[in-house]
Image (spheres, coloured by chain):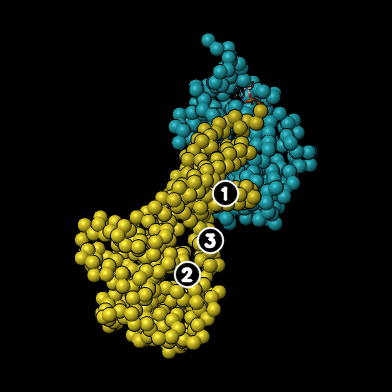
Chain colours: A yellow, B cyan
Amino acid sequence: MSIFSLVWSYLKAKPLNTALNIFLLSLGISVITLLLVVSRQLEQRVADNTKGIDLVVGAKGSPLQLILCNIFHIDFPTGNINLKEAEKLANHRLVKSAIPLALGDSYMNFRIIGTSQAYAELYQAELLAGDWWKEELDVTLGANVAALTKLQLGGTFESAHGLTNEGHAHEESHYKVVGIMKPTGSVVDNLILTQVKSVWHVHEEGEEKSNMSQPLDLKLIPGYSLQDSTKEITALLLKYKNPIAAIQLPRYINTQTNMQAASPAFETARLFTILGSAKTVLMGLAYLLVFISALSIFIALYNSLKERKYDLAIMRSMGASRFKLWSSVVLEGVSLTFAGTIGGLFLAHIMLFAFIQSIGDKSGLAPFHLYVEEAYLLIGGLLLGLLCSMLPAWQAYRTDIHKVLAGN
Amino acid sequence: MVSVKDIQYTYPKATTTMRFPDFDIKAGEHSLLLGESGGGKTTLLHLIGGLLQSQQGKIELDGVNVAALSAVQLDQFRGKKIGLIFQKNHLINTLTVKQNLLAATYFAGNPAAPERAVEILEELGLADKLNSKVTELSVGQAQRVAIARAVMNKPALILADEPTSALDDKNCDKVISLLLKLANHSWATLLVATHDQRLKERFNRQIELKSTQIPHP
Ligand SMILES: Nc1ncnc2c1ncn2[C@@H]1O[C@H](COP(=O)(O)OP(=O)(O)O)[C@@H](O)[C@H]1O
Ligand SMILES: [Mg+2]
């Protein structure tokens, strides 16, 4: 017998009430936790994926779409840009480095990206097995791609035209897997990397046209001489040489060329502002839920104290101090909110895990990563229990044992 | 063992003060406190048991003046020295029979004594009810558990306030016999306050309570 078994006996005596109060609080806490975890991880992933990219240059269209397509690989391209112009930009005095991207095909919904080695370096990708892509139609797979497509080193596959599985297959050209990367926690995990030339190879029928007076040795694609002035790529990822570039370069590209420049920092900040207001609304609802459950716990404690006035008086008559009665009521309230908070935290991570499972684990979210804020939530939950049991506990403290036990 | 002297008590907001007769009870001298309803039996019992504190006079129990104890000392005093039994059993419904008995030692701050609980229940013929819920007991059984609870801490004095008023003749007899038996086994002195005339023949010592109501000055 102890104060814990006493409190437990009271909670157990009203299982529905207890379960409902815990569940209600769990719901509120889980929404708060989900919002916290998802927004944190989203911000982290956005920061990781945009690191080292100052500007994305692509065809004119929506700047947000340009970013989503070429950095996060979730939207469709705005169009293509001319390679000769892109090369000119890569040699601009304000550009420190430039990475070409050529999109167009996919395999089992994983995008095939024609690019340079610098792209893999941007995300600090390392090899798990095999080698980087060297020859035309060689590919190196991201960690998730390898895991989910079950492609092996040396294996070959036909790409599908377009970025989803619906496109027709390019039956005439086979890609060959020469390497597999370690997980990076970035978009690269979900990509198939190859040369820009491979993407052209798959798409172009017939011989390369030669319509330039003099072949141009490209900085963007080392070891390649451009002879066809109509060749295109999807986008360029730029890094500025100095702070002045941030002011001059976007304006120059947007006004002087028929390409578009979009800043990942600016566009993602804009996106988070939109998401932020949705988050605020949901947060408000979650706090309302928490408030209602706290009120419900308070009412339950308050009412049960009336039923328990004889219990309280008899405990006092057996030698329990006023403080012991006070603590038993506080312990009951705190037990409820503690269980509710723990349940809510648990629920949030389980829901996130289930969600990630259902979409096929391409999001890169870590469902069981814990944050410091969750410890704060736990402390907050304990304080909430203290708060809603304060008044009932005070009443228990003041129990007039003579009046109750005299029974008249 | 118990000595009551010059006791007066005024309820808050009451217009009169109750004045109680002096008396002494020797250890082991089980006594009956008789009086009309409203005569002050419960008040006196609560004063002796430390549920109320008298404003005047002296109540000595084993040499301790109960009237002079502080609130915290009173809690401890009740736990160590007093066993209380009421007209209703006032068992804690959410606990089992055994847990109710162990609660008595817990709240008194004594070490848990599960063997003693079993022993007392056996004496009361309730050994098979050890793990029953108290809501499953009959009125008579529940009152016997309440008696068991009152002797758990081996109190010096057992105060029983109308313990048999809610019981029929058969149960009344049984309960009072068990009460006397347990009090003897636990070396406790029994003081029963009642207006139940059926108990008169069971006690040698009878204290007739005629408290006088004095108007406030
Ligand atoms: N809490 C109280 N406040 C004021 N008066 C009370 C209170 N409790 C009892 N009384 C009064 O004290 C007197 C004695 O009551 P009580 O001790 O309960 O008598 P008994 O137990 O003999 O029936 C009664 O007149 C009753 O009305
Ligand atoms: Mg009475």
Indicate which disc, 1 or 3, sits on the residue closer to the N terminus: 1
Q: Is residue B65 above or below residue A257?
A: above
Q: Is residue B179 above or below residue A161?
A: above
Q: Is residue B118 visible?
A: yes
Front-most of residues A177 and A300? A177
Name which residue type carries label 2: Lys
- The total number of labels drawn is 3
Nearest to viewer (mark 3 / mark 2): 2
Above or below residue B8? Residue A339 is: below
- Give the image location of residue A222, x and y in percent: 27, 80
Query: Looking at the image, which residue sits at the far bottom?
Result: A154
Amino acid type at image mark 3 = Met
Tell me whether the residue at label 3 lies in contact with that at label 2, contact meaning CB atoms closer than 8 angstroms.
Answer: no
Residue tagged 1:
A24
C-alpha separation, residue under disc 2 versus residue under disc 1: 32 Å
In percent of the image, x 66 and y 55: which residue is there? Answer: B130
Instruction: Give coordinates of residue A144: x percent, y percent.
Output: 45, 75
Q: Amino acid at mark 1?
A: Leu
x, y percent for residue B29: 61, 36
Q: Which residue is mark 3?
A: A351
Vertical placement of residue B42 versus A229, above or below:
above
Mark 2 element type? loop
Q: Chain of mark 1?
A: A
Which sits earlier in the primary sequence, circle 3 or circle 2? Answer: 3
Q: Nearer the viewer, residue A14 or A24?
A: A24
Q: Nearer the viewer, mark 2 or mark 1?
A: 2
Q: Chain of mark 3?
A: A
Cα distance between the residues tagged 3 and 2 = 16 Å
Please name the residue that numbered disc 2 is placed on.
Answer: A362
Chain under label 2? Answer: A
